[in-house]
């Protein structure tokens, strides 16, 4: 069945990139990369989350590309990046290093923003030479480093073995999501967005998530189930800001607070009342403004020094 992969109009319609390229990861995996905005402008790299694609960042790209060079890429198996049998946090780190190497000059610094699994990608890469060469600061949106399934509140019962078991089987389901129907929108909104999310936000997220192949969705759910990047958080030594919605069921605020406590150089935690897991879509202006602030403070000044 053919389905649109993104909305075609409005603030969440993906803008056309200035150019596209393919980055090749350490194991040969090919990654679709888009570059938006003017050459020579401060660089921003965007890493999307599980079941998403570059389209997830449409609102940020449209705003930032006016005066930033915005680099967005599809995680392996997502969007226009082919699936790979290698699904691991090491592969995610390899992929981010490959993108940085393919798009930035030697020694050039960028702000890297990661949402959900994209934030986990950033953590996984924190000790890599390529990451340390190119990353000036980080924004982590709606993410966590461990105990994702145990601390998720997607299943509305008390914490414990039963909730963990149910959550694992729901998130790891192999069932196809099917077309984007009214029921599908309600389910996605409940699990991933705040109760006040506008219909056009829900529609944009539903089209992106439903386009992810179920085999890819399942494979990466297994990685998230076993995730333990607590050690990597302590290696993330660049200035790092954290954003989370108070109604996030997938990576609740307890996850964000644990990151803040462990980060060597945390420069702020922003908790967004009533918002869910899809913060760049639910609060596009705020997330974009946080990126701009970090670029101004840690990228632009250092680039001009």
Image (cartoon, rainbow, N blue to C red):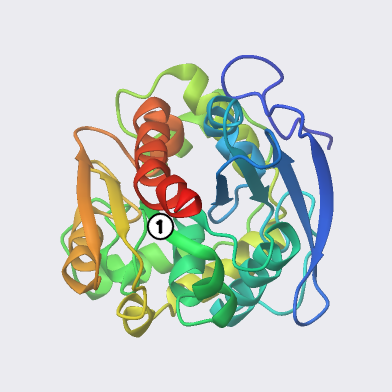
Between 103 and 164, the residue placed more toward the observer is 103
Point 65% across, 43% down: residue:
54
Q: Residue furthest top?
A: 10
Query: In percent of the image, x 44 and y 37: which residue is there?
Result: 280
Given residues 19 and 187, the one toward you in this image is 19
Position of 199 relative to 31 (above/below): above
Q: Is any atom of residue 115 visible in this view?
A: no
Image vertical order of residue 156 relative to residue 292, above or below: below
- Quadrant in the picture for residue 39: top right
106 sits to left or right of 249: right
Residue that numbered label 1 is attached to: 138
Q: Quadrant of the N terminus?
A: top right
Q: Position of residue 252 (x, y in %)?
A: 25, 54
Q: Residue at x 55, y 44 (%)?
A: 42
Give residue 155's position: percent from left, percent from top: 30, 54
Residue 29 image offset from top left, x and y in percent? 80, 72
Tell me the SS state at disc 1.
strand
Q: Is residue 196 above or below residue 147?
A: above
Which of the 4 image quadrants contains residue 232?
Answer: bottom left
What residue lies at 25% left-to-right and 75% top-to-bottom? 161
Q: On the rendered structure, is 179 left or right of 93?
A: right
């Amino acid at each position: 069945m053919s389905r649109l992969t993104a909305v075609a109009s409005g603030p969440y319609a993906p803008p056309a990139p200035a150019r596209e390229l393919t980055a090749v990861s350490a194991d040969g995996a090919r990654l679709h990369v888009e570059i938006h905005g003017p050459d020579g402008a401060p660089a921003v790299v965007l890493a999307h989350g599980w079941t998403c694609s570059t389209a997830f960042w449409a609102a940020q790209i449209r705003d930032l590309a006016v005066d930033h060079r915005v680099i967005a890429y599809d995680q392996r198996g997502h969007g226009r990046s082919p699936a790979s049998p290698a699904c691991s946090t090491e592969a995610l780190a390899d992929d981010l290093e490959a993108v940085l190497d393919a798009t930035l000059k030697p020694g050039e610094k960028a702000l890297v923003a990661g949402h959900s699994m994209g934030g986990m990608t950033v953590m996984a890469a924190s000790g890599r030479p390529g990451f340390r060469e190119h990353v000036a600061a980080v924004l982590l949106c709606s993410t966590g480093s461990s105990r994702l399934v145990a601390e998720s509140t997607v299943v509305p019962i008390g914490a414990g073995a039963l909730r963990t078991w149910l959550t694992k089987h729901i998130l790891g389901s192999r069932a196809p999501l099917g077309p984007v129907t009214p029921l599908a929108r309600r389910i996605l909104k409940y699990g991933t967005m705040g109760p006040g999310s506008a219909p056009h936000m829900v529609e944009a997220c539903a089209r992106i998530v439903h386009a992810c192949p179920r085999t890819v969705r399942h494979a990466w759910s297994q990685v998230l189930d076993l995730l333990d990047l607590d050690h990597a958080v302590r290696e993330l030594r660049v200035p790092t800001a954290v954003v989370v919605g108070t109604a996030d069921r997938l990576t609740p605020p307890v996850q964000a607070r644990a990151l803040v406590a462990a980060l060597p150089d945390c420069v702020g935690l922003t908790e967004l009342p009533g918002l869910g897991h899809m913060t760049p879509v639910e609060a596009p202006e705020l997330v974009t403004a946080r990126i701009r602030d970090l670029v101004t403070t840690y990228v632009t000044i250092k680039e001009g020094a």
